[in-house]
Image (cartoon, grey):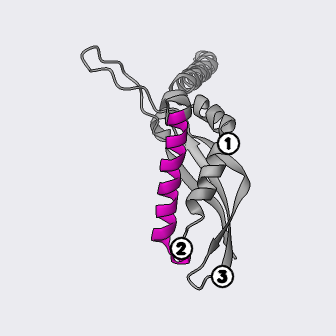
Amino acid sequence: MAEDEQEDAPKKGKGKLIIIVVAAVALLGGGIFAGPMIQKMISGEPEVVADADAPAEAAPAADAIYKGIHPPLLINFQDNRGRSRFLQMSLELMTRKQTVVDAIDTHNAVIRNNLILLYGDVKIEDLSGREGKTKMLGQALEEINGILTEQTGEAGVEAVYFTNLVVQ
């Protein structure tokens, strides 16, 4: 009888080892397949599911393209005391179409000329406050889109930004 118990002991040990190995392989395999799904759930990326009955959504907007007006504009103007002052500004224009960027390059001279004329009568008070600066950017946007519409038939500048503004 002692011999029968000794033979059963290695069989039980091998059986447990086989079960442990099979369980480890199953867990590893499950982790390989489930890992990417769990990572998506954790990162918060929405899963895209097409619904045949849902209306088609508009295409996402194109990325913004920024185009600078270079070199910086240098404008002389008179302050309220009649003294000559200087305004130096760098502008960046934002659009979403490469054709508009190309039109800005092509008509750069007209854009620069019209902005210099526009800001030649600027008031020093307008340059010291946020409201005045915002108004100036709105005027620039209107002027630039007017030029582009006149020259190309398309106004595509969405925003104008100061990247440098110096008053002397």
Amino acid at circle 3: Arg
Q: Is residue 114 left or right of residue 159?
A: right
Which residue is painted at 51% across and 78% down in the image?
125
Amino acid type at mark 1: Asn
Viewer-nearest residue: 135 or 66: 135
Give the crowd class for mark 2: few <14, some 14-19, many >=20 residues within 10 Å: some
Give residue 79's quadrant in the image.
bottom right
Residue 144 drawn at (x, y percent)? 54, 45
Q: Position of residue 107 (x, y in %)?
A: 65, 38
Give the residues in magenta. 124-150
Q: Tell me the residue that label 3 is attached to.
A: 83
Q: Is residue 66 above or below residue 79?
A: above
Majority secondary structure of magenta residues: helix
Instruction: Identify whether 105 is placed above or below 5.
Output: below
Cα separation, mark 2 vs mark 3, equals 12 Å
> Residue 123 got which mark?
2
Amino acid carrying label 2: it is Lys
Residue at 37% across / 26% down in the picture? 58
- Magenta residue check for 84: no
